[in-house]
Image: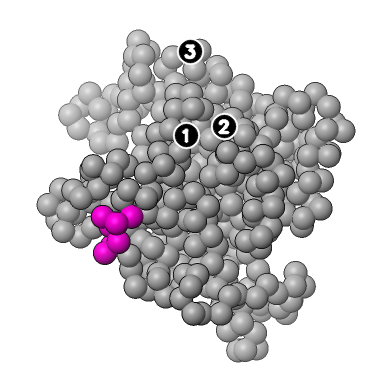
Amino acid sequence: MSDNNWRSNRREFLTATGGLVAATLAAAEPLSALAASPGSGLPAAPQPSPGQGSSANAPRKLLIGVFDPVYNTLSLDQMLEKISALRLEAVEIGTGGYPGASHCPVQELLADAAKARAWKKKFEDRNIQVAAFSCHGNPVHPDAKIAAREAQIFRNTVLLAERLEVPVIVGFSGCPGGSPTDTMPNWATYRWPPEYAQILDWQWKERIIPYWKEAARFAREHNVHKLAFEMHPGFCVYNPKTLMRLREAVGEEIGANCDLSHLFWQECDPVEVIHFLGKQGAIYHAHMKDTVLFKDNIERYGVLNFAFEPKDIPSASAIFRAVGYGHGANLWKDVMRAYMEVGYDGILSIENEDPILPGEVGVERAAYVLQNVREELLNSNSGAA
């Protein structure tokens, strides 16, 4: 899939159609989310200084950032102005693959160290941390040309992360075919009928584990030690169990991009997931994106009935939402507290694919919820001390 397909099928589609579905689904807005949104009359969250709350028992102030493809129509400088105005403190930057590389000319920065330093300085001058590079793709695709292209994007991202001291690379595990002769990926999740057990065993033994052992070795040799896999449908790593299977087979370079939006529809408990992965030191990144579940349609069609197109939403079991609009602010407070409890030291990266609050609006609303939740947690801890 090309970069253009990713954007048209996901982010640009949702941006273009957000207004169409807003009226249709206005009734689906959770009141708890609306109470934590701009215009609600609640005070805006003040930003504590970096040194605030430094007692031994104080929770770490997790930085709130954004994944940049939502701003892919803006120049780098325009994007930086936008996110500075939202008081965001970090970014996750696409370097190719499905997210594209709208704000990061990877080849130029690899070819010229001075250009690379100047690029990063634009962020540093605004006190914004470049916390992760993202090159989501399918480096084990059964089409050898696609696999080679995605693997090269990954290697280039590793080299750039080494040069710019970016600690985390975010991506997908990928999904091979079901046999050596397949030409399209085959996402198998169930070991019956027996053919599917054969598919799963072959995929992991012959493709997934060998590729990521070599890729992790390459990353390690270039001082990159955190490969954060988004647990995503369609790929071999799609839940905490499959993530840990790959980590155990490959090594501690493998960890999670804990995007809860892909776990809600699997009926995972978000706090339990964070505790399970966090206690094993296996969370390297966190996408902040919500999912709304439509109970009546779940009862009728089941949880796998996800929708992206407006015409399908009335019969959908689930759609993506901005943080706080699928589950209320209280749940996201529990989520952030859980990240603090397990000692997570990455950022909270807002990814917007909300069809009702498209583009920059979704980022703004998510930032507002997260900033207020963080402030409440930090202040409550300070008061208790």
Name of the residue lying farthest toward the left:
300
Residue occupied by mark 2: 100
| Side of 197 relative to 154 (left or right) | left
Distance, label 1 to label 2, CA atoms, is 8 Å
Is the N terminus in the top left, top right, bottom left or bottom right quadrant?
top left
- Dot 3 crowding, Cα within 10 Å, few <14, some 14–19, many 20+: few
Tell me residue 47's x, y (percent). 68, 72
| Side of 377 relative to 104 (left or right) | left
Kind of residue at badge 2: Gly
Determine contact: label 1, label 2, CB under 8 Å. yes
Residue occupied by mark 3: 144
Q: Earlier in the sequence, mark 1 or mark 3?
A: 1
Tell me residue 23's x, y (percent). 29, 57
Distance, label 1 to label 3, CA atoms, is 23 Å
Is the C terminus in the top left, top right, bottom left or bottom right quadrant?
bottom right
Residue occupied by mark 1: 7
